[in-house]
Each structure stands twice: as C-alpha cells, then as structure tokens.
Image (cartoon, rainbow, N blue to C red):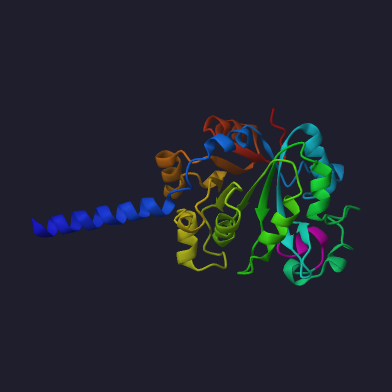
Amino acid sequence: MFWILIVFLTAAGVFALLIWMIHPAPDRRGELASFLSYHYAHRGLWDTAAGIPENSLSAFAAAADAGYAIELDVHLTADGQVIVFHDNTTARMCGTSFMIEQTDWNTLSALHLAGTAEPIPLFSEVLAVVDGRVPLLIELKLPSSDLSLCSAVMHLLDSYRGPYIIESFNTFGLRWLKKNRPEVLRGQLSARFPRTLNVAAPARWLATTLLVNTLGRPHFISYRFADTGTTGFRAVRKLFRTPCFLWTIRTQEDFLICRQSGCAAIFERIRPA
C-alpha cells in the first residue's frame, strides 16, 4: 500500500509539473480579442502569377488594401538592419547563397525576390506601407543564440502607431520580451517537428509539447494547422483556453475548421471572406 501511495504521489507531482510548464502567461484575452477577429495574410497577400512575391512591399500593400491583417518575418543583417524575409538563406527566393545574418544590407538590397523587380524590404519600409491600417503578426527569426534582433525590432516599433503582436519559434526571444517588454503580446510558434530537423530530439519534444512555455510564458500560441492533434496543443487549448493562431491555411475547408475552433487563420492562396 505504501508503494502504491508513493507511485501515485510521484505521478501526481509529475503531472502538476507538466501543467505548470505549459501554462501560458496570465490572461490577456481581452487585449488579443481584436487580433483574433482578423484573417492573416501569410507573408502578405502574395500572388506568384501576378508577379507579387511573398514578403514584398507589394504583397503587404495588397493585404492592407484588402483589409487583411499581415503575418511577416524579420531577420537582422550582419550590419544590424532589420529586414523582412522568411528563409535563413537567399537561395529559394533570390537564387543566391547568402546567409542572412552573415550578410550586410548593401549586398542584400541589390537582390530581387522570385525573379521580379521587387527588392527585399526593410522592416521600416513595411511599417510605412502598412501605416497602422491592419494588425501585424511579426515573427522574430532567431536562428542562433544572438537575440540582438529583439531590441532592434522593438526600437523600430517604438515609433510605430499601428497594432502588432510578436511571435517566435525561439522561446528565448519570447523570454527577452517577457523581461524587457512585458507589455508586448507575445506568442510561441510550434508544430510537430520532423526528425530531419537539425535540432536535438529533447529540444524538438519540448517545443512540440509546448513545455518551453515555462521560459517564454506566451500570451498566445501559433501552431501548425496539420499538427493540432498533438497532446501539448490540445492541453493548452483545453485547460487554459489559450488564444491561438493556426498556420498555414490553404483551403476554404480548412479555413472554416480553423474559425469554428475559435482560432485565427494565417492563410495563403485563398481569399477568406
């Protein structure tokens, strides 16, 4: 009987610890309500056939003109410029092989996106184009332990008067915001990460299960739509009703499922009503 009690108490303790680890930040759902009411154009309202590449000024202008909120990605160049670009290298979008964080802005500014005349934009240029017309969902791209991007982005946002929230896969970036800018609404990006990802298995597991919440204490979750059956995601939604954004929605059917679940949709290739 004694050993049964020990096992029970141990299991209860482990369960309580796991619940504590995935717990989000204190409730700020009221502040997030307006953000959740929008549909988010993934990397802007891009259209390859129309010559509008992702994460371009024209894609962001099109989204704002259509009344869609915007999801975008920011990197820090080698010389400290904040640019809007998704990948860690320029290979896919520009046909070159530059590592973003290791390349200066003068070199990157000469490149063009997806064979168009569109250049890689500075974050400041995107802020000027959007001009507060629609909310921004800003992903911090932090491929290393260097968190200099966090302060550089916040410096630019300090003079911006439009609505925005910030997310990242890197929970240490969220921890930086928690410590230095606690007023900013922050979100943990996650998914069921494949084994082929160049990340240690324990780190993949912690991220997928959202146990990394213990470091960043996010106000919302941004999760891959295809992976919402994972235990961590379901627990965060069921236990804490954590506000959620789902990516990437590419069909009207998935869009309806997303909205019926109470999550905001980050979409591409469709035009949600």
Residue at left 73%, top 68%? Answer: 101
Position of residue 210 measured from the top left corner of the image (x, y, whole percent): 47, 53
Where 205 sits versus 261, above or below? Answer: below
Instruction: Look at the image and tell me in which quarter the C terminus lies.
Output: top right
Query: In the rendered structure, which segment of residues is drawn in magenta?
Result: 88-96
Direction right: furthest residue: 117
Position of residue 124 measured from the top left corner of the image (x, y, whole percent): 81, 52
Direction left: furthest residue: 1
Q: How many marks?
A: 0
Direction top: furthest residue: 273
Answer left or right for 116 relative to 221.
right
Asked if residue 168 can be seen in this view, the reply is yes
Position of residue 271 measured from the top left corner of the image (x, y, whole percent): 72, 33
Where 244 sits versus 189, above or below? Answer: above
Residue at left 86%, top 42%? Answer: 50
Position of residue 243 measured from the top left corner of the image (x, y, whole percent): 53, 40
Residue at left 67%, top 40%? Answer: 267
Instruction: Look at the image and tell me in which quarter the N terminus lies.
Output: bottom left
Asked if residue 86 can be seen in this view, the reply is no
Residue 271 in the magenta stretch? The answer is no
Residue 95 in the magenta stretch? The answer is yes
Residue at left 46%, top 59%? Answer: 206
Query: Toward which corner of the image does residue 214 lie, by quadrant?
Result: bottom left
